Image (spheres, rainbow, N blue to C red):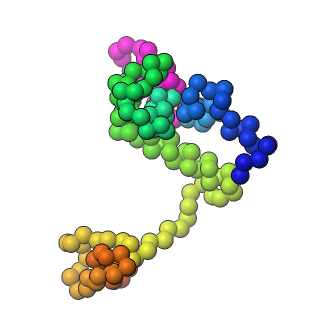
Amino acid sequence: MWTTENRRRYDRDELRYPSDLTDDEWAHVEHLIPPAKRGGRRREVNIREVLNGIMYVLSTGSQWRYVPRDLPPRSTLHDYLQRWDYDGTLGKIHYALYQKCREQVGREASPTACIIDSQSVKSTEKGGPASIPKGMMRGRKSVARSGIFWSIARAC
C-alpha cells in the first residue's frame, strides 16, 4: 500500500531509467553473479550495467535493437542473459530473492506444502495404467484422467 512513509523507498526518479538497480537491490544480487572466466582477457564490461540493460529490456518489453546507447551493446546483454540462463545464475537470483520476499512477510524461506488440483493436472497419453478412465471435463473442455491421485499413490 502506498503511504507517505514508503513512497520515498520506491521512488526511482533519481535513477537513469526506472528499471536500473538501486544500490540496495544491487547488494542483494551482486554476490550471485559468477566471476569472470579464468584465462583470456579481463572482463571489460561493468556487470551492473549488463544487469541494468537486461532489466531495461525485460521491464519495457522493447526489442534488443532498441537498447539505449548508454547501456552495453545488445549482443553483450543477450550473451550474458543466455549464459546466465544456461549456467543457472538466473535461477539462483530468482530463488534468493524469492526467499528474501517470503522472510520479509514473516513466512519460512521455503514453502512446506504443495497442492495439486487433479482437475487441472494433465497426463500424457502413455502415462498411468490403462484402467484409469479418461473423462471429459465439461467446464474446461479438456480430457483429464479421473484417478490421477490414485495412480500417483499406487506408483509410490
Q: Find residue 121 and report its image quarter.
A: bottom left
In the image: residue 96, left or right of residue 12: left
Quadrant including the C terminus: bottom left
Task: Name the residue at 55% across, 45% down.
Answer: 96
Task: Name the residue at 35% across, 35% down.
Answer: 82
50 is within the stretch colored magenta: yes
Image: 7 above or below 133: above
Where residue 129 appears, x then y in whole percent? 23, 80
Question: What is the chief secondary structure element of the magenta stretch?
Answer: loop
Region rendered in magenta: 30-51
Task: Name the residue at 36% across, 17% down.
Answer: 39
Where residue 18 appears, x then y in whole percent? 58, 32
Pick the residue in front: 45 or 58: 58
Pick the residue in front: 6 or 148: 6
Pick the residue in front: 22 or 94: 22
Image: 54 above or below 123: above
In the image: residue 42, left or right of residue 27: left
In the image: residue 151, left or right of residue 62: left
Q: Which residue occupies the extreme right position in the image?
A: 5
Task: Name the residue at 40% across, 77% down.
Answer: 118
Do we see residue 153 in this rendering? no
Q: Find residue 28 and report its image quarter.
A: top right
